[in-house]
Image (cartoon, rainbow, N blue to C red):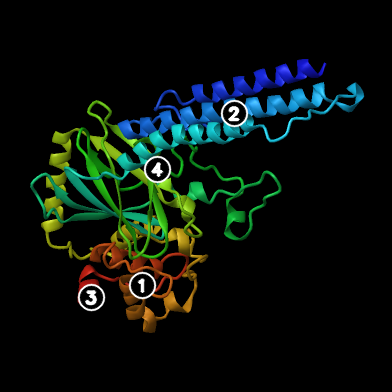
Amino acid sequence: MQSTLFHRAAVGLTSLMISGMAVASDWTERSNENLRPGVTGVSQEVYDLHTTVLWIVTIIGLLVFGLILVSMIRHRRSKNPNPSTFHENVLLEVLWTVVPFVILIAMAVPATRVLIELDDSSKAELTVKVTGHRWKWEYEYLTYEDDNNIGVSYMSNLATPIEQINNPVLAGGLFPYGTAQDAVGSEFPEKDKNYNLEADEPLVLPSGQKVRFLITAADVIHSFWVPDFGGKKDAIPGFVNETWTVVPEGKEGTYYGQCAELCGKNHAFMPIEAEVVSQEEFKTWLAEKKEEAAAAPDLTPFADLDEAMELGEQTYAGACAVCHGNNGEGGVGVAFAGSDFATNEEHLDEHIDVLINGRAAMPAFGAQLSPREIAAVVTYERNAWGNDTGDLIQPQDVQDHE
């Protein structure tokens, strides 16, 4: 009976391991049971290393637990076994010292080779500085081929609608409270497999060329991780870490990642969307971005309050709502709805200054948003949710304030 149970358990464990390794055999399919092979050469090497080590530890586990079960069954008390009398067996002691050493070396050699390869960011055609902010990414293109002064940078924010994130949860004993109560029964956008993974400004990369990433952070520790590229690197304030990737030609497409280091309240809303295009498309995109960066800031005045409110609502949803609430009710940040700060004219200059230069835990948006966007969002915060101050801030007001 016991032997049959042991046989069934061994077969079941082996089948589970094999099925786990079979899952994610295609890099386009996500797996809940196993790693993905990824799209780059080094990511596939990481996957192969993982599979090799999994086989080794599974075989060791089956042997060790098998010997334990056999010993328990064959030498149980009811059989009145005679204990072995051997002592200080030199051969056995050599074996259980040498065999684990050989196994460790067999795993360490390929692991060390992959780790060295993961850190080799030399001979890169493109260098991108990646800076983690709470809770978004900033991409700065530094060098590309013979161009050592690109001067292109932008912020990448979560693109998932705030209504989809804040929909009330009614299952499992979790009930909505506060402003979420008003949303009970409302219809929300359907969540697909890319929920919380899409960004408003993706990281654009060329295929077939080596890309070096310089990883750092502006506030707390983050971690840059795109599973299909292989490896991940911590983004630490005051330090610069390096990693790299090469997406083969013919594998153009969109790849998703996330911050992999718990960095605060909105850690889950800090996605990475990498759009890999052909080298020709990348050069065209980069030339357009360089023209935008070289142009003077858009200081075109708003024609009326409605125009400013429309842009302000879009900007607020992407940059402010995660902290200050979708309806200005506050959260990590202060509340705007009905607050003295957002309705009293005496605080207008201070309101603009805080958005430009930041304060306490709030980051400075002067380098993240254009003067036109800052003017629009301040106008929106002072006129939405019943504030109705009538204040219309123009881009030139922000420019003069800076």
CA gap between label 4 and label 1 equals 28 Å
**Residue 162 located left or right of residue 366:** right
Disc 3 crowd, CA 10 A, few/some/many (<14, 14-19, 20+): few
Q: Do the residues labelled 3 and 2 touch (CB within 8 Å)?
A: no
- Residue at the spot 23% in from the left edge and 50% down from the top edge: 128
* Secondary structure category for the residue under label 1: loop
Q: Mark 3 points at which residue?
A: 402
Residue corresponding to mark 1: 358
Residue type at mark 2: give it.
Answer: Ile
- Viewer-side label of 3, 1: 1
Q: Counting residues from the N terminus, which is met first, the one under dot 1 or under dot 2?
A: 2
| Residue 57 relative to residue 88: left or right | left
Residue nearest the viewer, comparing 370 with 383: 370
Tell me the element at label 4: strand
- Classify the position of the C terminus by image quarter: bottom left
Badge 2 crowding class, 10 Å Cα cut-off, few under 14, some 14 to 19, many 20 or more, is few
Q: Could you tell me residue 152's position as x and y percent?
A: 18, 54
Q: How far apart are marks 3 and 1 (CA)?
A: 13 Å
Q: Where is residue 266 in the image (x, y as percent from the top left)?
A: 48, 56
What separation in Å lies between label 3 and label 2 (alpha carbons)? Answer: 65 Å
* Mark 3 → mark 4, Cα distance in angstroms: 35 Å
Q: Is residue 40 visible?
A: no
In front: mark 4 or mark 1?
4
Q: What residue is disc 2 on?
A: 60
Instruction: Find disc 4 in the rendering and name its residue.
Output: 257
- Identity, as a three-letter code, of the amino acid under mark 3: Glu
**What whole-number distance in Å separates the C-alpha atoms at marks 2 and 4?**
34 Å
Q: Can residue 57 be seen in this view?
A: yes
Q: Is residue 345 above or below residue 178?
A: below
| Residue type at tag 1 | Gly
Element assignment for label 2: helix
